[in-house]
Image (spheres, rainbow, N blue to C red):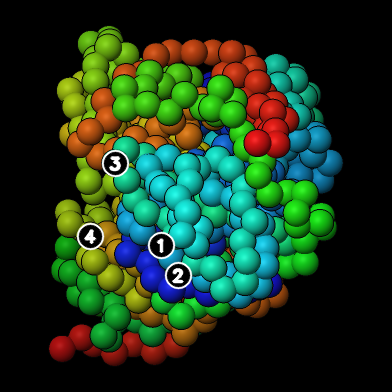
Amino acid sequence: MSLEVIDVSGLATIQDAGRKGWRGFGVPISGPMDVFAFYTANALVGNPIEYAAIEIGLGDATFHAMQDCVIAATGVGYQLSVSIWEFSLWSSFFVRAGWKIRLNKTDDGMWAYLAVTGSVQTQPTLGSRSTYLRGAFGGFKGRQLQAGDVIKTGIPSHLSYELAARTLPEEARPKYNNDPTIDVIMGPQTKYFTDEGLETFLSSEYSVSFTSDRMGYRLEGPPLAQWGKTELISEGMTFGAIQVPSNGQPIVMMADCPTTGGYPKIGTVASADIPLLAQCVPNKSRIRFQETTVAKAQKRYRELMRELDRIVEE
Amino acid sequence: MIFRPKIVPLGDAALLVQLGDEIDPTINQRIHALAALINIAPLDGIIETIPAYATLLIHYDPLTLTYAKIRKWLRMKLDQVEDAKSRKPREITVPVHYGGEYGVDLKFVADTHQLRVEDVIRIHSEKTYTIYMMGFTPGFPYMGKLDDAIITPRLETPRTRVPAGTVAIAGSQTGIYSIDSPGGWRLIGHTSLRLFDPTSEPPFLFSPGDEVRFIVENYRSSH
């Protein structure tokens, strides 16, 4: 099957679950900003959840199905239209050859995921189909999608009809909202921050700056006071880690962040809450942080992943 | 000062093994030895390791491994690392055109230290450097230690674009830009060697822990 790109006004890229195995060489993981929505889109169409799909953000995207297929769209802040009908996200649909598939940006939310039966089949680079834009490799020719691109998908492993009209009920999804409280595992450089700085972090509201992107979300709010030494020798970094440069404004590392960094890290967002943070809207969402333990965070993540089993027929 | 090894979480899907807090070749060798020990027979659920100057970051799958379990396993590995034999580092020779249109800060480095440009070139190219770690961009090697005579701070404001292959120094480190990217280091020359090609096998010229020798291919003064 092939999907033709008709128009993209935002940022659309091919992403799989991420490029693993090369972070020791400086290659970021890339992959989806909201990994739970990504996994769900794949699960809805019967694909292995780690396989490649399309991430759409910051604007609209329109595609044209060149053959019959089943698609699913998930995420926050988008409306799906298939041919002449409009739908909400988090369900799968049968699409006839020639029909248009449109993802239209609405208020709230940032990222949507479009999965197709058979998965997106581009040439993998360094073992992954994720797009690393700064390095100009991976995904579709190492760049964002544009009008005229033809995306090939594979042969589905299930009969198409069985996969249409499935949904993940709202109760099973992360509690996306514009005033989230985000769980954070504190450290490893809590000692760089004054007691006041730590208290500020855990009691203040932060908004997401418009300068945020797939590399990092720059937060705006009360600055976090440090003792004076504001740099450390570089060490490994992870998606969700919160670095704080000397201006005291936290930056949350996202999918395309560099693999190492030299600013103090006040904490790391719990894996179960990264999707909530990723879907926060610049200048609108108000984020608060609360401390959690590794054990509690891991338990929450396992519980979240089990929600994928709650896909039902509509 | 004795630094006791520490294991600290970096979220719920990664942790840092800390063997020190400074740039020290002995500590760094131990980091690479530990990484090798882990990667030869990794615990199920370990995804990959990122060596840095004095720390090793381990990415793991929290669906397969609890923090408690991986911590326990790592403490065992830390006990073994003293006896572990590191692999003999590969030595890679890098030919450099010093100065010229790419090495635009070479004269600045010389002037800062009241040296002749020829001295800076000789001092930079006479040492064998260890790649302490890779990061910043795919394939960028952080190497050291520079001779004290040419230690130079980085730029206040990074340049928006430094071409791939540019040889640079910052503080006591030297590096080579692996892809076109912004850059804050002092630029002293250029190599035509390709550090990273995603379509090649292997894709990277260097690995963390390798040793690098710069060879003076040419020197052209900047105008």
Spatial CA distance of label 2 from label 4 is: 30 Å
Q: Which residue is mark 3?
A: A107
The subunit letter for the residue under badge 2 reads A
The x, y position of residue A200, in whole percent, is 24, 14
Spatial CA distance of label 4 from label 3 is: 36 Å
Question: Do labels 2 and 1 touch, CB within 8 Å?
Answer: yes
Q: Which residue is mark 1?
A: A61
Spatial CA distance of label 2 from label 3 is: 23 Å
Between label 2 and label 1, give the one nearer the viewer.
Answer: 1
Between label 1 and label 4, give the one nearer the viewer.
Answer: 1
Q: Which residue is mark 4?
A: B158
Q: Which residue is mark 2?
A: A145
Amino acid type, mark 4: Pro
Q: Is residue A80 left or right of residue A35?
A: left
Question: Do labels 2 and 4 touch, CB within 8 Å?
Answer: no
Could you tell which of marks 2 and 1 lies nearer the N-terminus?
1
